[in-house]
Amino acid sequence: MNIKEVHTQEKPVSAISLFKSDQGNATAIQILQGEKLKEHITKIPALLVCIDGEVIFENEKGIKETLRPGDYIHIEPLVTHWVLAISKSQLILIK
């Protein structure tokens, strides 16, 4: 299976579970061009990996990183953050 085939609908932001276990999970996220994954927090550390496209990750601490295919960022727990898609993007979130 290919990550680009996981999302069957063209919703602005789509999140689909890829893997779950008692020790963590992985979620496929698709964000359409110009759309935003709105502000939110995570209670545990997370890793966001860009598979395809280009996004800007920002958080309330002033971090602003552009992610392109192969780039990743560690997400701090309890810090508000959001993601804006510069182009249609495929991401993997690992918690």
Image: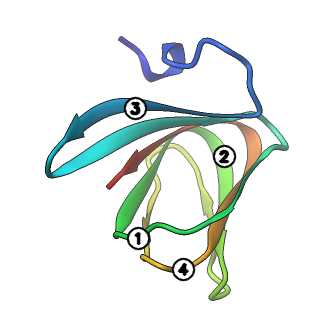
Name the amino acid type tagged 4. Val
Secondary structure category for the residue under label 1: loop
Q: Amino acid at mark 1?
A: Lys
Q: Residue furthest bottom?
A: 61
Residue 18 at what x, y percent from top left?
Answer: 35, 29
Check residue 43 in the rendering and tell me which mark sits there, or answer none: 1
User: Which is in the foreground here, disc 4 or disc 2?
Assistant: 4
Q: Residue 70, how many percent across, how many down?
A: 44, 47
**Which amino acid type is marked by label 2?**
Glu
Q: Are marks 4 and 2 in contact (CB under 8 Å)?
A: no
Disc 4 target residue: 79
Q: Residues within 10 Å of mark 4 (few under 14, many from 20)?
A: some
Residue 36 falls left or right of residue 30 = right
Q: Separation of disc 4 and disc 2 at Cα? A: 22 Å
- Nearer-N-terminus badge (1/4): 1
Residue that badge 2 annotates: 54
